[in-house]
Image (cartoon, helix red, strand yellow):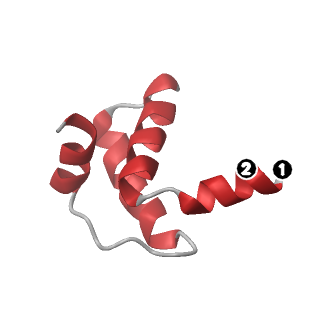
Amino acid sequence: MVADVLAYFSETTEEYVRRRHGELKARGHTNDEIFPRIAAELRGRRVAAPELSLRQLRRIVYG
């Protein structure tokens, strides 16, 4: 369990965005719901990521 917690907090912003996008997409959410949600989650993380626009989040996921 400790390894899981350490792995979670060692994720880069890009890894987190890609993982969360995949999780939310698998649950049937649309991109219009997903990207604002991820942006809000990034602000609330223990080590806050830099402020990213919705466009920047899309670029992380889709290139």
State the residue at coordinates (51%, 56%): 11
Horizontal and vertical percent position of residue 7: 63, 53
Cα separation between marks 2 and 1: 5 Å
Mark 2 surroundings: few (<14), some (14-19) or many (≥20) residues within 10 A: few
State the residue at coordinates (17%, 39%): 63
Q: In which quarter of the image is residue 32?
A: top left
Amino acid type of the residue tagged 1 in the rendering? Met
Residue 62 appears left or right of 2: left
Residues at circles 2 and 1 in contact by the CB criterion of under 8 Å: yes
Residue 43 appears left or right of 56: right
- Residue corresponding to mark 1: 1
Q: Is mark 1 on a helix, strand or loop?
A: loop
Mark 1 surroundings: few (<14), some (14-19) or many (≥20) residues within 10 A: few
State the residue at coordinates (51%, 71%): 44
Horizontal and vertical percent position of residue 18: 39, 41
Q: Is residue 38 positioned above or below 26 on the image? A: below
Horizontal and vertical percent position of residue 36: 34, 53
Question: In this view of the protein, which residue sits in the foreground, 5 or 29?
Answer: 5
State the residue at coordinates (25%, 65%): 52
Q: Is residue 41 positioned above or below 19 on the image? A: below
Amino acid type of the residue tagged 2 in the rendering? Asp
Q: Is mark 2 on a helix, strand or loop?
A: helix
- Residue corresponding to mark 2: 4
Q: Is residue 55 positioned above or below 10 on the image? A: above
